[in-house]
Image (cartoon, rainbow, N blue to C red):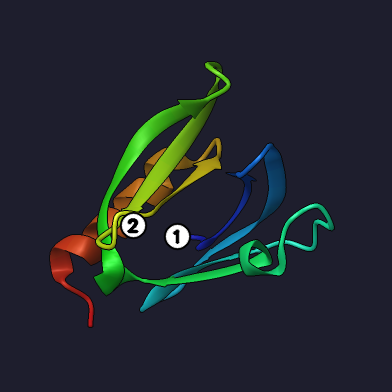
Amino acid sequence: MKNIFWVSLCYKGAHGGGLYLKEDRLIFRTNKLQLPESMKHISIRYEDLDKVSFSSALAIFPAVTINLKDGSSYKFITLSRDKISRFIGSKIKAGVQ
């Protein structure tokens, strides 16, 4: 499976970038000037994830919401939410360290 996806981060609007699903973490990268530096490169270890779920953005765009154990969450608009959620879900269930 290809583990790089074009997505849009939902954070005060939609900001396009790449979602990279690595063996131990997921990484979102973008160069959008409107975003604060902390949102331009997001790296999350799978062991820090609580759950991944289907959602929507602006009531019409398919999205995936990633919830962390610390209570924070990220929403990404994507047409590949099945593949993304399946891959991340398998990592959560496997207890990747």
Q: Which residue is rendered at x = 74% and y = 56% of the image?
A: 35
Q: CA distance from mark 1 to mark 2?
A: 9 Å
Residue 63 image label: none
| Sooner in the amino-acid sequence: mark 1 or mark 2 | 1
Could you tell me residue 66's position as x and y percent? 37, 50
Q: Secondary structure at mark 1?
A: loop
Residue 1 image label: 1
Of the pair 4 and 47, the residue shown nearer to us: 47
Of the pair 1 and 48, the residue shown nearer to us: 48
Horizontal relation, residue 49 to residue 12: left or right: left
Q: Dot 2 surroundings within 10 Å: few (below 14), some, or many (20 or more)?
A: some
The amino acid type found where label 1 is placed reads Met
Could you tell me residue 31's position as x and y percent? 79, 63
Q: Nearer the viewer, mark 1 or mark 2?
A: 2
Of the pair 79 and 49, the residue shown nearer to us: 49
* Callouts 1 and 2 close, C-beta under 8 Å: yes
Q: Secondary structure at mark 2?
A: helix
The amino acid type found where label 2 is placed reads Phe
For this orientation, the residue located farthest to the right is 33
Of the pair 18 and 1, the residue shown nearer to us: 18
The C terminus - image quarter: bottom left
Could you tell me residue 60's position as x and y percent? 55, 17
Vertical placement of 55 versus 65: above or below? above
Q: Dot 1 surroundings within 10 Å: few (below 14), some, or many (20 or more)?
A: few
The N terminus - image quarter: bottom left
For this orientation, the residue located farthest to the bottom is 97
Q: Which residue is rendered at x = 36% and y = 78% of the image?
A: 24
Which of the 4 image quarters holds residue 44? bottom left
Residue 87 image label: 2
Count of marks, rendered view: 2
Which of the 4 image quarters holds residue 48? bottom left
Vertical placement of 32 versus 12: above or below? below
